[in-house]
Amino acid sequence: MPQKSWHLDRRTFLRGCGVSLALPLFDCMQAVATPSGRSSHPKRFCAVYFPYGIVIRKEESEDSQWNWFPSGSDREYTFTNTLKSLEPLRNQLTILSGLSHPNGRKMGGHDTADIWLTGAELKAGHLKNSISIDQLIAGKFHDQTRYSSLVLSTDGGVGEPTRSSTLSFSRTGQPLPAENRPQLIFDRLFGLNPDSKIAQENQLKNSGSMLDRLLTHSTSLKNRLGKQDQAKLNEYLESVRQIEERVKRSQQWLEIPKPEVNATGLHLEADDSTPRELIRTMYDLIFLAFQTDSTRVATYQLGNMNGATSIAGKFPQLLGFGKNMHSLAHGGRKGDKGAEELGRWSQYLAEQFSYFLNRMASTPEGDSTLLDRTMICYGSSNSYTHVNENYPLVLAGGGDLDLKHGQFVQLDKKTPLSNLFVTMLNRLDVPTDQFVDSTGELTDIL
């Protein structure tokens, strides 16, 4: 007789004799419990951004070994020194060249990190962004995970228009603050709340009541304001509504304990003085958030494009690469030494990304892996220093989501990056005919 199919919640504990032990992750725990009672095998999205661009040299030149893009094409390609750490994963990823945002081609070389996931046009007098692809996906999964998305960056906060410190933007184009302190991120995802359940309930009710009163009062206030002030009030109220959504989410998940994870090996004390530990720990936190189904959407900006103030700018110097990020990028276009210096920094970043992919690929989930059900976009919005075309991009994962990998796809340089976004959205159960300036799906990866 066939064995009856059954399911255990991921947060099931073995209880007896006064002892409570967290069970290992069995295959029958793969379906995910939610406050709404739904269960599913989750699909996920992750985007990782690095600033300032890459090395591009003619293939016959000696310093072409530090090119970011491989040599060859299609399935007959060879990684250079820069991306060679991805070789063991080549059948689970695709290298893309040629893509860019048409609106980004009109913008300054420092300005395009803001629109990497939105495709919007930012210009003098109109610095209003639009919704980022991660937040479209987060809206699909918003009632199925404790956190709708995880927004991370090295600098944290939101930065300023055209020098953003976050990749994520709300449905009205407002920047969503990024978190950058590992200990606080870990505590938010997995930490215990020292307050009693009743105290938490009261706090959430009080917060909800105050927000209700504020939103009610805003209606009468809005009628007495001029157009410019009304626009400012609307931006403010959008932030209030984001808080309101977080309060409601916290109320829904109050009855469900946070997952227990092993923090051994995590450098939760890491900060901008220890970039090696900080970058690795950020990847670890995304991995744990996905593994525990705390969220299905994550973005991580390794540095913003504000060379004067970004705390990530000094990382290459601290790690022994000689110059800050901005200087490496400019030097990358000047002679063999400049190409090698920037190439080695790009190589280091690729190695950290490879570490993350390997963790995802080696973690089973039912008859598959975490990587097979996660689409991960890694890249920049510059090719050469401050040139907003031919973005360097890696699309990894999604083996169970009908993607064709193991190739280097070279596209026309006028192809909109939004074509890739439409393709990803449709395979993440967010049916989409068009995103911003897309002209269709990217059929080369299907």
Image: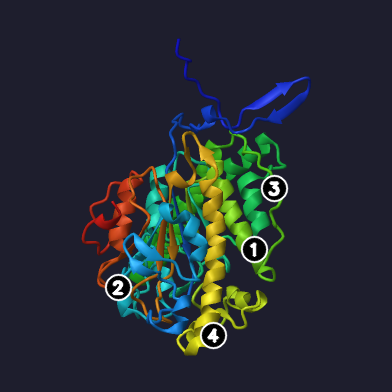
Label 1 SS: helix
Of pointers 2 and 4, the one earlier in the residue sequence: 2
The residue shown at (54%, 45%) is 362
Label 3 SS: loop
Task: Answer above or below: position of 121 versus 375.
Answer: below
Of pointers 3 and 2, the one earlier in the residue sequence: 2
Per the image, the residue denoted by label 4 is 327
Label 2 SS: loop
Q: Position of residue 354 (x, y in %)?
A: 53, 59
Of pointers 2 and 1, the one earlier in the residue sequence: 2
| Residue type, mark 2 in image | Asn
Q: CA distance from mark 3 to mark 1?
A: 15 Å
Per the image, the residue denoted by label 1 is 278
Q: Marks 2 and 4: CB-CB under 8 Å?
A: no
Q: Marks 3 and 2: CB-CB under 8 Å?
A: no
Task: Answer above or below: position of 318 versus 352.
Answer: below
| Residue type, mark 1 in image | Leu
Eye-nearest disc, 2 or 1: 1
Is residue 360 something that shows in the picture? yes
| Residue type, mark 4 in image | Ser
